[in-house]
Image (cartoon, coloured by chain):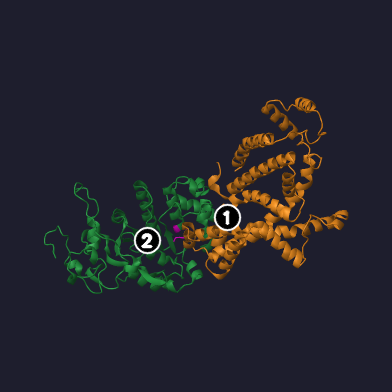
Amino acid sequence: METASNFLNIKDVSTAFKINGQFYDAISHINLQVHHDEILAIVGESGCGKSTLATTIMGLHDPAETKISGEIDFEGTNLLNLDDDGYNDFRGAKIGMIFQDPLSALNPLKRIEDQISEVMDYHTSLSKEEKHERVLQLLDEVGIVNPKRTAHQFPHELSGGMRQRVIIAIAIACKPDLIIADEPTTALDVTIQAQILDVLRDIQKENHAGIILITHDLGVVAETADRVAVMYAGQIVEEGTAEQVFNTPEHPYTRSLLRSMPQRDNENDDLYVIKGNVPSLQKMPSTGDRFAPRIPWVPASAHEENPSMHEVAPGHEVRCTCYKEFSFPDEKGSVTV
Amino acid sequence: MWKTILRRFLIMIPEVIILSILVFLLAKAMPGDPFTGSINPKADPQQIHHLMKINGLYDPWYQQYWQWVVHLFHGNLGNSYQYQEPVTRLIAGRAGNTLWLALFTMILTYAFALPMGVFAGRHEGKLPDTIIRVYTYVTYCIPFFVILVIGIWIFGYVFGWFPTTGSISAEASGSGWLQTIGSRFYHILLPGILGALFGTVNIVQYLRSEVIDAKGSDYVRTARSKGVPSKDIYRHHIFRNSLLPIAAFAGYSITGLLNGSIFTETVFSYPGMGLLFVNSISYRDYTVITALVLIYGILNLIGTLLSDIILSIVDPRIRIE
């Protein structure tokens, strides 16, 4: 799906971590595009590699402990060729990141104003007064009621929701083209979640930024995302527009995920549970469908030996051929072994 | 900020009162009376009894305590049995020496420890880190007085670079102020350096592990995602956060220095409060011991007060707004 507006092109990226002297892929052969004016959601359960993908794009891995291959083309530059200094021209300036845990992501000893204006120290030539004005404006933009007061406060004086707003303010301070939000609402309660998502959407519209929203909360995805990529065990298993993925999910994993969401009309039924666990990095099989062990009723012949992505509709891709034969055990026409 | 300091200072007042009561009661519990040693052993017990009575030694303890406190505020801590001179004058003559040595040791300690700790933490697992760690483990394993004795033997005896006893040389004590200061400084060099080498151990280890922790913390990751260069991340984010436990430690380290001064002064025959303390214990010079325990106790309290003040300066979270 190559269009003129795509500015981030992730091509065949794998990130491997060193465990006991050996490298194991945490994410393997990821291909993704991000366009201006869109929110791409990456969903998957814990440990599927969502955050690894985010930190890989940000270049936050320790080069001694990780091996990254592939290409991350950001507005014509391959980020993976940059050294730390070169990367610093992108981090904060053109790519902003919002972190998962607002309680620990701010430096406890620095005032909010200093933490926000720090990003401008390195990427803009604004004067001290201009930076101060910009900080107040940013705090106002992210919905802080009394920016002057908050700017002067320390992180421990703010609530979780306010801290997350501050982190968003830091991420957007230099109007980046790409914002990576790694589970921005996980640590917050539901009402604050909705507000934070609204803020993100407003910013995206205003700056024409592309947002990668990483989450395991399908409710958040349904509310905000334009496109969705579903990850399982370090691979993308399904990718498409939000409508495609939610209305006509194809991959067994996507379907299982959606089925395991509590529904209002079946509140008396047992919740669907995907049996088994994500294999650990060391035990990841090198061939075969990685999700196969968790749907044992599907015959082995349904899976590809080296599962690849198949286009099922324009812009809607699914990994492996098993989706054609998949149905839940209690559904009509289910395949029994 | 000032509120925190004031509040912390006010808390110290009851602490000092409780300390002084304890010290007073301990002194009262010691065997003997103030007259047996200072008058003729053949004196009539009846007369001693009379002296005790007119001096108020049969009064209830709180009345005696009050008397003692009143004397204390007049700078009267009694007379030393051993030296037959007022305790106040005795201590005043030595406090300067101890303070001078302790201050020098403290400055040297931090001058060694801060760069070493940060450097070791920053280059964790590499050769310089290993060398620093080996140094801290080895030093930590050797008792302090052994380090002092070895130091004296190597630098004072084998190389003969430093004087090994006293606080000033005989020639310098009579001559001009420049020679006096020079000689005094010369005399604290070796005990100061040895004390600092020993004192760095804890600080280096603390700082090293704090730096390693901070390196992996979320706020450092945030800073990196802002595009802050590595050296600025150390300067603006890691260093200050890593200093928190060291700051908390700084005031208490005064206590450590005073304890250390007892060893140092004894081994170096350096005429300070530590040596006086050890001597007074061996001569059962109760008035001096009581006074010194009280002083050490108050210095301890001041140490913790300083720790809290330093901590409230560097850590906004514990300030009272």
Give the residues drawn in magenta, as a range: A171-175
Residue A5, horizontal then vertical, whole percent: 35, 68
Q: Which residue is mark 2?
A: A211
Quadrant position of the N terminus of chain B in the picture: top right
Res A78 visible: no
Closer to us: mark 2 or mark 1?
1
Q: Amino acid at mark 2?
A: Ile
Res B270 visible: yes
How crowded is the residue under tag 2: few (<14 C-alpha within 10 Å), some, or many (20+)? many
Which residue is at the front of the view, A207 or A158? A158
Check the image and name the residue furthest to the right: B175
Residue B105, horizontal then vertical, whole percent: 69, 56
In the rendered view, tell whether residue B219 sits above or below residue A236: above
Measure how far apart labels 2 and 1 are at the Cα level: 37 Å
Q: Which residue is mark 1?
A: B243
Q: Write down the quadrant of residue B54 in the picture.
A: top right
